[in-house]
Image (spheres, rainbow, N blue to C red):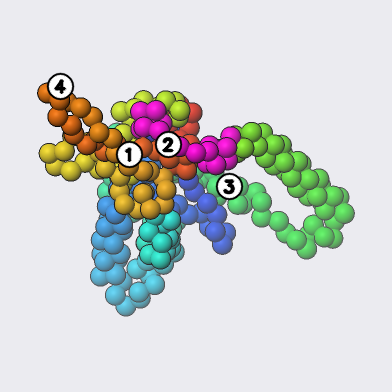
């Protein structure tokens, strides 16, 4: 797994007037497998249940909210994730150690603080606004400015979106090294990312990589088989993993131009 420690921003979001972070995003930032984060949350819930056996809701409450999700790579199957509020995140993060983990804890605390401030600043007393024409006019002007700003961002992003669409609709595939060049990242970093995120794997004793079946089925990767002639005149069959246009589009959406995971 790889990304720039300085480029990534903790993902937090507002829901029902509170701030939450999702376990999948936390796993990505702290460079941990999501399954390991889920195990840590399960252990926390068991401990909390033991201490609050008389009140099951007090054990988890809004700290950890189960949020199922589906993966396009495995249609028809649901996976677990958790939305956690500040308290839930802090309970989980206490188990993450190391200098890099400390930096991410501080970044998440700052992100929670900023989102909570935004929620407070955006809370509007509707009855007071409706009874005051000046406040209502000011609120409408503020929202109009936000709409104009969003329209500007949409136009700014349009060329990039169109470029991704052209890639997605193009024919052919490329080697992982060629894909790294197209994404402007180091080949070794892309190989590391693909192995760490279950795109490719290598069997023990093998010198070549293979694509995971669900990446093949969803058209993100493909195998290209070629026959090469050895120095002694004998032939051997070599299978190479190649990134399809659809796969390159997916990777382009997940990486920044510098190669940092978004």
Q: Residue at x 31, y 52 (%)?
A: 213
Disc with the residue nearer the chain's start (1 vs 3): 3
Which circle marks residue 224 in the picture? Answer: 1
Within the image, what quadrant is residue 158 found in? top right
Residue at the far top in the pictured view: 231
Between 260 and 206, the residue placed more toward the observer is: 206
How far apart are the two marked residues, 1 and 3, measured between alpha carbons?
53 Å
Residue indicated by mark 2: 173
Q: Is residue 147 left or right of residue 83?
A: right
Find out whether the residues at labels 1 and 2 contact each other: C-beta distance under 8 Å: yes
Question: Residue 231: which numbered mark, if any?
Answer: 4
Q: Nearer the viewer, residue 148 or 169?
A: 169
Q: Residues within 10 Å of mark 1 (few under 14, many from 20)?
A: few
Q: Would residue 184 be visible to someone looking at this image?
A: yes
Spot occupied by residue 182 in the image (x, y as percentages of width and height):
45, 28
Q: N-terminal of the two: label 4 or label 1?
A: 1
Q: Which of disc 2 and disc 1 is earlier in sequence?
A: 2
Mark closest to the chain's N terminus, 4 or 3 = 3
Callout 2: few (<14), some (14-19), or many (20+) C-alpha neighbours within 10 Å?
A: many
């Amino acid at each position: 797994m790889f990304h720039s420690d300085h480029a990534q921003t903790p993902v937090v979001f507002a829901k029902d007037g509170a701030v939450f972070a999702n376990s999948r995003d936390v796993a990505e930032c702290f460079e941990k497998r999501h399954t390991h984060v889920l195990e840590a949350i399960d252990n926390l819930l068991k401990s909390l249940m033991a201490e609050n056996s008389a009140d099951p809701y007090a054990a988890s409450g809004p700290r950890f909210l189960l949020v199922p999700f589906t993966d396009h790579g495995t249609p028809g199957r649901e996976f677990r994730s958790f939305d956690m509020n500040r308290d839930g995140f802090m309970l989980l993060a206490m188990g993450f150690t190391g200098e890099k983990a400390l930096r991410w804890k501080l970044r998440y605390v700052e992100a929670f603080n900023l989102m909570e401030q935004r929620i407070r600043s955006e809370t509007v007393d509707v009855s007071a606004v409706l009874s005051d024409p000046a406040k209502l006019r000011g609120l409408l002007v503020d929202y109009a400015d936000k709409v104009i700003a969003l329209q500007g961002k949409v136009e700014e992003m349009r060329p990039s979106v169109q470029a991704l669409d052209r890639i997605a609709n193009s024919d052919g595939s490329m080697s992982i090294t060629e894909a790294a060049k197209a994404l402007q990242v180091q080949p070794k970093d892309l190989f590391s990312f693909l192995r760490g995120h279950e795109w490719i794997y290598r069997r023990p004793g093998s010198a070549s990589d293979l694509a995971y079946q669900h990446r093949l089925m969803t058209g993100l990767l493909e195998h290209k088989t070629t026959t090469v002639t050895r120095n002694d005149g004998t032939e051997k069959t070599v299978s190479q993993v190649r990134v399809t246009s659809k796969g390159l589009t997916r990777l382009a959406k997940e990486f920044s131009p510098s190669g940092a995971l978004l």
